[in-house]
């Protein structure tokens, strides 16, 4: 994603009409930059991993190598209907423990 280029800084404006125009341009620029260009998979720090859940409702230890303790995860896709939930192992800078209510393969965003 490119950096936002604004016509000028608001501090240089003294006329209220110019402030309003600058605000409209700024908001339009932000909307144009983000509409359709922001994705949770691509724009959230983390990693997408493919994980096999061989047994339903059993802890799976996932080595993520983020080098920080993840704050969350979400299911990106799977080969069967499944829900993910926290496992009972301790999440660290290297691993996270997750469970699935079904057996199957899942693509997971860990962040």
Image: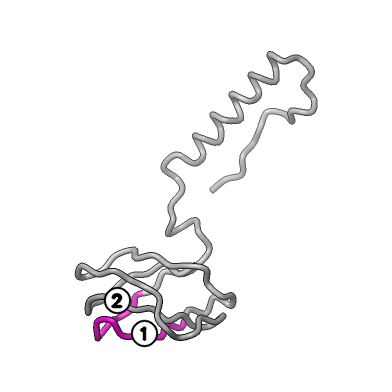
Q: Farthest residue in the left direction?
A: 80
Residue located at (56% from left, 32% from top): 29
Q: Looking at the picture, does residue 94 appear above or below residue 71?
A: below
Element class at badge 1: strand
Q: Nearer the viewer, residue 67 or 83?
A: 83
Q: Residues within 10 Å of mark 2 (few under 14, many from 20)?
A: many
Q: Nearer the viewer, residue 12 or 61?
A: 61
Q: Within 10 angstroms of label 1, few (less than 14), some, or many (20 or more) residues?
A: many
Question: Of the residues under marks 2 and 1, which one precedes in the sequence?
Answer: 1
- Mark 2: secondary structure: strand
Which of the numbered marks, if any, corresponds to residue 100? 2
Q: Position of residue 14 (x, y in %)?
A: 79, 18
Residue 95 lies in the magenta stretch: no
Q: Is residue 101 left or right of residue 111?
A: left
Tell me whether circle 2 and circle 1 mark residues in contact (CB < 8 Å). yes
Question: Which residues fall within the magenta stretch?
Answer: 50-63
Seen at 24% across and 85% down, the residue is 55
**Residue 99 figure quarter:** bottom left
Q: Which residue is mark 1?
A: 60
Identify which residue is drawn at 29% across, 76% down: 100
Q: Is residue 83 left or right of residue 70?
A: left
């Amino acid at each position: 994603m490119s950096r936002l280029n604004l016509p000028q800084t608001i501090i240089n404006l003294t006329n209220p009409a110019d402030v309003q125009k600058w605000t409209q341009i700024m908001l339009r620029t932000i909307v144009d930059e983000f509409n359709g260009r922001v994705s949770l998979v691509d724009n959230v720090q983390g990693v997408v991993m493919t994980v096999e859940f061989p047994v339903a409702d059993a802890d799976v230890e996932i080595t993520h190598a983020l080098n920080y303790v993840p704050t969350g995860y979400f299911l990106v896709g799977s080969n069967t209907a499944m829900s993910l939930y926290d496992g009972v192992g301790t999440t660290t800078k290297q691993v996270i423990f997750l469970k699935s209510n079904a057996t199957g393969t899942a693509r997971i965003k860990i962040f």
